[in-house]
Amino acid sequence: MYSTLEHFLKYVTYDTQSKEDAGVVPSTPGQMVLAKEMEKELRDRGLKDVTLTDHAYVTATLPSNSKKKLPAIGFIAHMDTATEASGKDVKARVVKGYDGGDVVLNEKLKIVLSPNDFPFMKNYVGHDLVVTDGTTLLGADNKAGMAEIMGAVDWLLEHPEFEHGDVRVAFTPDEEVSELARGLDIGKFGADFAYTVDGGPIGEVAYENFNAASAVVKIEGRAVHPGTAKGLMLNAVMLGHELLSMLPPSETPATTEKYEGYFHCLGFEAETERATLRFIIRDHDREKFEARKKFMEKCVNWLKDKYGADRFQLEMRDQYYNMAEKLKGHMDIVDTAVEAMKALDIQPFFIPMRGGTDGAALSWRGLITPNLFTGGHNYHGRFEFISVQVMEKASSMILKILELYAKKAK
């Protein structure tokens, strides 16, 4: 059996970066390669009901060893890594006994992970840190969650005397590009409830998240020779900038925090005759979320009135909703995770997640699934790192949750 760290160092070698607008699931072939490896690992360990779908969803069950009627608990992590930085040829290394100073990731390229930039590094003095070589992301989001789940599974297999109910495991594709576990058959998965192990620093618990929508605005301009363009040219580049100028500058990701929502322009591709702007729209409050979508429509409609309705096309769709609405009446699931952390001397803290997880969508589909920490920092970039000791704590947290449910049952 492998340690949590050994699992993690293995999984990050797989290139599973997902891709926006691929039109297929998984969006990249590397995810299926890792999915097949996970299927093999689970079969080799003797888990039951091991399944790999054509869309790279991997599920399995470690059956209950208890005579009590215990809940079937799911633990879920996603296999893909973020679009913002490469996940190919990840060269992870372990910095033993971090001393609180700078960590040179790449001497040749002068890339340094420094507490001057990331003050929270000081919390990990004495820990063993897994870092990158400064040219790729690490992939702790969410391969740390995968490793922590598998570390717990291995421990359970090595300790058959440890009482537990059915443990359902799922590894999913394309979370980073909003697939959000659509292909997970909740009925076949068979969990009474679940946890995504997909959070940030140690102790983090999330049972509320953004409501989310995407918006694409396509603009048709009109090109005319600039020497004779007065009153005739409609420059799509400038029309796109005009739209951007209508959105409040104080409501962007860079200017908001906690429960503050935002408009975020992900991309702006433009030339004189045509432009495409891609946005995401976020807010925790459902009414404010709906108001943000209406405001985007109002801005586009105003430009249509000004320049012609055929010049602007808005495509907007909801992506996911705040799972807090579905957790009402089920907070015992969160409370048990908090109890497990406290039993392990972990100080839990709650965050209004400024994003979404597979669990958010699953909660709306009927499988209540709050989100728990993995221990990672600086996700989606080359300065990503994670503590080995915290990863081990996350595996212990999974085991403690199972233990608590076994103790509570009659």
Image: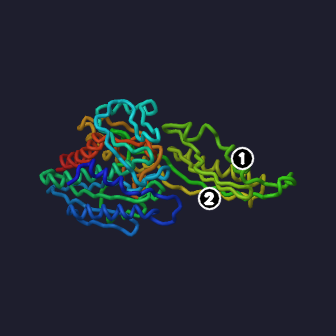
* Amino acid under disc 2: Glu
Q: Is residue 56 above or below residue 241?
A: below
Query: Is residue 283 or residue 373 the one in the foreground?
Result: 373
Label ID, residue 315: 2
* Amino acid under disc 1: Glu
Q: Is residue 399 above or below residue 344?
A: below
Q: Position of residue 261 (x, y in %)?
A: 54, 42
Location of residue 375 by image quarter: top left
Query: Is residue 163 or residue 397 the one in the foreground?
Result: 397
Query: Is residue 117 or residue 376 the one in the foreground?
Result: 117
Q: Residue furthest bottom?
A: 54
Q: Position of residue 174 (x, y in %)?
A: 44, 58
Location of residue 310 by image quarter: bottom right
Q: Secondary structure at mark 1?
A: helix
- The residue carrying mark 1 is 242
Residue 117 appears in view: yes
Q: Residue furthest front?
A: 108
Q: Position of residue 229 (x, y in %)?
A: 85, 53
Q: Secondary structure at mark 2?
A: strand
Residue 231 appears in view: no
Label ID, residue 254: none
Q: Residue at the spot x=79%, y=58% of the render? A: 223
Q: Residue at the spot x=38%, y=42% of the render? A: 385
Q: Earlier in the sequence, mark 1 or mark 2?
A: 1
Query: Is residue 293 or residue 353 the one in the foreground?
Result: 353
Q: Is residue 381 above or below residue 316?
A: above
Count of numbered labels shown in the rendering: 2
